[in-house]
Image (cartoon, helix red, strand yellow):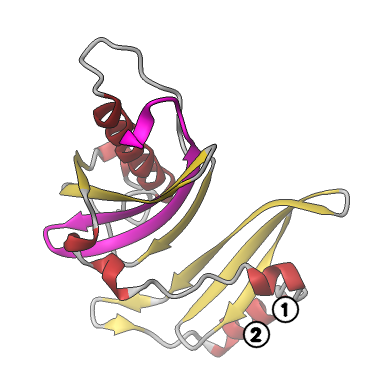
Amino acid sequence: MHTGVRRVGRSSFTFGQEVMVGDKRVGGGDATVVLADRSGPLQLPDELIADLNEMRLPETEVAARSAAPRVPPERLHRAHYSYWTPLRSRIGDVDSNQHVNFIALATWYDEAVAAFTLDSIGSAAGDSVPDLPPWSYQIHYLGEVTYPGSYEVALTVRSVGTGSVHYELGVFRGSTCLGVADAIGPRGDGAHGQ
């Protein structure tokens, strides 16, 4: 596992991780940390910028290709999505910064996919739940998800292949989109109405 800094900005930095088996990259991820207060983004201190620059990962072709694209504007609007799952934040979801933990938030996307799958195949209460969780996520955090709070996870199916389904998801509080995700998971028999 290689961890380091990919990019340093004026008020944020992005760190990345790459999981290697020998010379083969088998996984990875990036996260952007923004220094801010209630008034908005703050300038990173020069000493922190110097420390972050010392922790830079070597730039690789894989890292350049994996840079996260900007979120398409239509993904921020409720009209883009066709399915909705209500969720309420739990005290156990909260991290030391008083936000819903990113791992807990990722499970919300799993919940939306599971609920959508059950509705698609017409399962009733007590029926067995198909084991079709996504195996890949790309997540963009756009705002703070807090406790207490009532939210909705939106979902639409982008494409269905012979063995997989590509989902587009979003977390909303009212009309405000707080995050979006792309997920790819297995296609089960009879699932997704396709």
Is residue 109 toward the left or the right of residue 173 in the image? right
Magenta extent: 167-194
- Check contact, mark 1 vs mark 2: CB within 8 A: yes
| Total numbered badges shown on the rendered structure | 2
Under mark 1, the amino acid is Glu
**Secondary structure of residue under mark 2:** helix
Q: Quadrant of the C terminus?
A: top left
Under mark 2, the amino acid is Ala
Indicate the quadrant where residue 64 lies.
Answer: bottom right
Tell me, yes or no, whether the highlighted magenta stretch contains residue 176: yes
Is residue 131 toward the left or the right of residue 40 in the image? right
Q: Position of residue 11 (x, y in %)?
A: 45, 84
**Secondary structure of residue under mark 1:** helix
Residue at 26% x, 67% y is 76
In this rendered view, identify the residue nearer to me: 14 or 73.
73
Residue at 51% x, 86% y is 45
Indicate the quadrant where residue 114 lies.
Answer: top left
Residue at 17% x, 62% y is 79
The circle drawn on residue 54 is 1
Q: Position of residue 172 (x, y in %)?
A: 21, 56
In this rendered view, identify the residue nearer to me: 98 or 102.
102
The circle drawn on residue 50 is 2
In the rendered view, tell whether residue 194 sits above or below residue 151: above
The circle drawn on residue 16 is none
Is residue 61 toward the left or the right of residue 117 in the image? right
* Whole-number angstrom distance, CA of label 1 to CA of label 2: 7 Å
In the rendered view, tell whether residue 34 sits above or below residue 96: below
Tell me, yes or no, whether the highlighted magenta stretch contains residue 123: no
